[in-house]
Image (tube, rainbow, N blue to C red):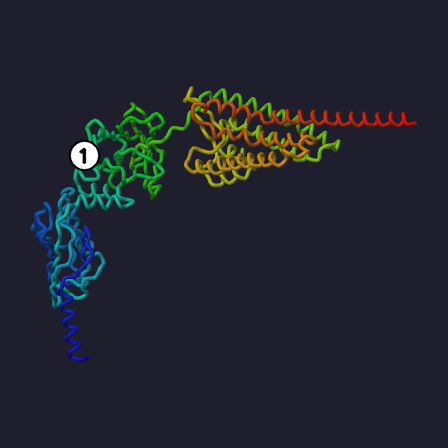
């Protein structure tokens, strides 16, 4: 190699070893390496004091040293004789500024140089490399920070400098941006090792230690100073909460005044969220439920509150469920949740389903109308079959198909309430078969099935029927398959009716073939415009529209029979008039012939 080139490479390497190394700033610090030493018993030495000047991690033939001013409260000057003495040894230095906790791990041995003294406000963090010193034989090899290699050579010392920030505020800002931010907060509270009150800008918590004689505990959650004392939640922990196999266990109750960590666009919850967890335990199916009391402002009459929970074991993404919780409405401004598991709890606000007035009367009218329509369809079908035998009407097949469809519609609608009350959900879903939209909705799941309709006169005894469920997916399907198709049918019916009237109004066939025109017009009105009444179901005329809708549409089969009878009578009168006119003309012609003779 060229000597000049060798000198250049040497300068580059020297600058690399001694110059500052830029790395990504992280709140938590992790520095690892391989400690090369001789056969002497290894020793860990620490000298840590409050401040934020930085930290020095060094090593020689027998001692690994960690010293500096980086802590908020920790003050230590101590030496540990390590139990392992192999050469070389892997080690890592961990620094968590939020917990003010410094830990050193050498092979499988873990030493807590600075144990946690609680969550800190101001702390020393964002440690960045500030310098290195080379070593000839013993020291730190392959030093790295968060997995990023600093130097592959054996170094005697690494220096890092830090900055003072508000760790609690930064931690909360990071947690809000993460989907598992609430878990981060609870884990930090548990790791703090504090028993009692723990405060963060984004959450306040209480850590209770359950001992062998634990018989239950009433927790008054800490709240921010801006929250009045009489509105914050309270929690009752039952005796069954303590794991039987443990003498002592810690339970953490966390209160989140700002629910931004838990909001879902499709579900609206109140501001207060309470998280409850037992350290290193998954608690389910409690024989005695945990009771969480939420206090809130008055809820609108059109809304209702339900206790919900986010079970992180089932749902990796935030989803509020009612399973495992019972809602108890104590007062207008107080809702109590009885839950048999531990997780995050909140109050879900939902718009009350519309409660119908006169539901029993409307149901009776509909049932009688459908029964009368079904009988009428049978009579019309018999009459159409007789007409077919006489060969009078070529459209008999279309009319029979219409009558059969209307008969099954009335029959199934009469049975839908009975099936929803006494049969299995699958039978209820089968009620719509083989209609294509219903088959599609059933296959999508949680859209079509038993549906409960509340009545304002008797909320305790709602009406059950087979219909689209009360879910967001079902609401979307209702808007597409029911409202959308109905609007299309009604609109197209009006348009076609208008075009037919405009086309034939000035024709001579209007009077000659008025029976056929009236038949077409009657079908258009009967099976198109009457369903359009549903679009006027609002305002002060809502109840009148509902009664008209139920009466007219449930009696469609009866009206079809009347139409069939009227048209048959009009047709027979027309034929009689035609025969009479023809007979008179023939008789007059014969008389004229006799006079000529």
Q: Position of residue 264 (x, y in %)?
A: 33, 39
Q: How many marks?
A: 1
SS assignment at label 1: loop
**Which quadrant, please, contains the C terminus?**
top right
Residue at far bottom of view: 2
Residue that carries the numbered disc 1 in the rendered image: 224
Q: Position of residue 574 (x, y in %)?
A: 72, 27
Q: Residues within 10 Å of mark 1 (few under 14, many from 20)?
A: some
Residue at far front of view: 596
In the visual, does 573 lie left or right of 190? right
Query: What is the quadrant of residue 404 in the picture?
Result: top right
Query: What is the quadrant of residue 324 in the picture?
Result: top left
Q: In the depicted view, which residue is nearer to us: 486 or 228?
A: 486
Q: In the depicted view, which residue is nearer to us: 241 or 466?
A: 466
Query: What is the quadrant of residue 524 in the picture?
Result: top right
**Which quadrant, please, contains the N terminus?**
bottom left
Q: In the depicted view, which residue is nearer to us: 190 or 460?
A: 460
Residue visible at 44% across and 24% down? Answer: 356
In the visual, does 585 lie left or right of 345? right
In the visual, does 152 lie left or right of 570? left
Q: Does the image show residue 535?
A: yes
Residue visible at 48% across and 22% down? Answer: 544
> Please, is residue 58 above or below residue 287 in the view?
below
In the visual, does 175 lie left or right of 442? left
Q: Position of residue 315 (x, y in %)?
A: 35, 42
Q: Position of residue 283 (x, y in %)?
A: 30, 37
Q: Does the image show residue 37?
A: no
């Amino acid at each position: 190699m060229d000597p000049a080139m060798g000198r250049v490479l040497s300068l580059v390497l020297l600058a690399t070893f001694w110059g500052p190394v830029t790395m990504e700033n992280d709140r938590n610090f992790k520095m690892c390496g391989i400690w090369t030493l001789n056969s002497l018993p290894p020793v860990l030495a620490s000298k840590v004091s409050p401040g934020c000047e930085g930290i020095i991690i060094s090593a020689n033939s027998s001692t690994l040293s960690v010293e500096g001013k980086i802590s908020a409260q920790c003050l230590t000057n101590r030496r540990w004789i390590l139990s392992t003495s192999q050469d070389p040894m892997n080690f890592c230095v961990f620094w968590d500024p939020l917990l003010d906790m410094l830990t050193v791990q050498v092979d499988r041995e873990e030493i807590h140089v600075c144990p946690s003294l609680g969550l800190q406000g101001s702390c020393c963090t964002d440690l960045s490399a500030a310098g290195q010193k080379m070593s000839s034989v013993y020291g730190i090899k392959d030093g790295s920070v968060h997995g990023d290699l600093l130097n592959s050579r054996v170094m005697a010392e690494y220096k890092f400098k830090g900055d003072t920030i508000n760790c609690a505020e930064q931690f909360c800002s990071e947690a809000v941006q993460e989907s598992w931010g609430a878990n981060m907060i609870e884990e930090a509270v548990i790791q703090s090792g504090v028993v009692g009150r723990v405060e963060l800008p984004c959450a306040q918590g209480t850590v209770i230690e359950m001992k062998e004689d634990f018989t239950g505990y009433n927790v008054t959650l800490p709240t921010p100073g801006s929250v009045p004392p009489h509105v914050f939640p309270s929690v009752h922990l039952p005796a069954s909460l303590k794991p039987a196999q443990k003498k002592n266990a810690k339970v953490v109750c966390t209160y989140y005044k700002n629910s931004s960590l838990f909001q879902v666009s499709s579900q609206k919850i109140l501001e207060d969220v309470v998280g409850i967890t037992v350290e290193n335990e998954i608690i389910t199916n409690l024989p005695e439920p945990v009771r969480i009391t939420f206090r809130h402002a008055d809820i609108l009459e059109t809304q209702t509150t339900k206790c919900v929970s986010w079970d992180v074991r089932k749902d990796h993404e935030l989803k509020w469920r009612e399973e495992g919780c019972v809602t108890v409405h104590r007062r207008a401004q107080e809702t109590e949740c009885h839950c048999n598991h531990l997780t995050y709890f909140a109050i879900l606000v939902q718009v009350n389903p519309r409660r119908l007035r006169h539901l029993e009367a409307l149901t009776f009218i509909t049932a009688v109308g459908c029964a009368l329509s079904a009988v009428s369809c049978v009579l019309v079908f018999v009459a159409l079959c007789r007409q077919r035998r006489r060969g009078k009407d070529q459209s008999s097949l279309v009319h029979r198909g219409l009558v059969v469809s209307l008969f099954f519609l009335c029959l199934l609608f009469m049975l839908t309430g009975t099936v929803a009350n006494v049969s299995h959900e699958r039978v209820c879903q089968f009620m719509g078969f083989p209609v294509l939209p219903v088959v599609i909705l059933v296959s999508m799941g949680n859209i079509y099935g038993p549906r409960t309709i509340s009545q304002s006169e008797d909320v305790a005894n709602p009406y059950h029927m087979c219909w689209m469920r009360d879910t967001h997916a079902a609401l979307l399907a209702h808007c597409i398959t029911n409202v959308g198709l109905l609007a299309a049918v009604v609109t197209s019916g009006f348009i076609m009716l208008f075009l037919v009237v405009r086309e034939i109004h000035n024709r001579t066939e209007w009077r000659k073939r008025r029976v056929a025109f009236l038949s077409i017009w009657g079908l258009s009105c009967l099976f198109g415009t009457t369903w359009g009444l549903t679009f006027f179901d609002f305002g002060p005329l809502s109840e009148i529209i509902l009664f008209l809708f139920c009466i007219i549409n449930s009696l469609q089969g009866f009206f079809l029979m009347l139409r069939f009878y009227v048209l048959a009578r009009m047709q027979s009168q027309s034929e009689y008039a035609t025969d009479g006119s023809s007979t008179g003309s023939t008789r007059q012609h014969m008389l004229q012939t006799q006079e000529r003779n």
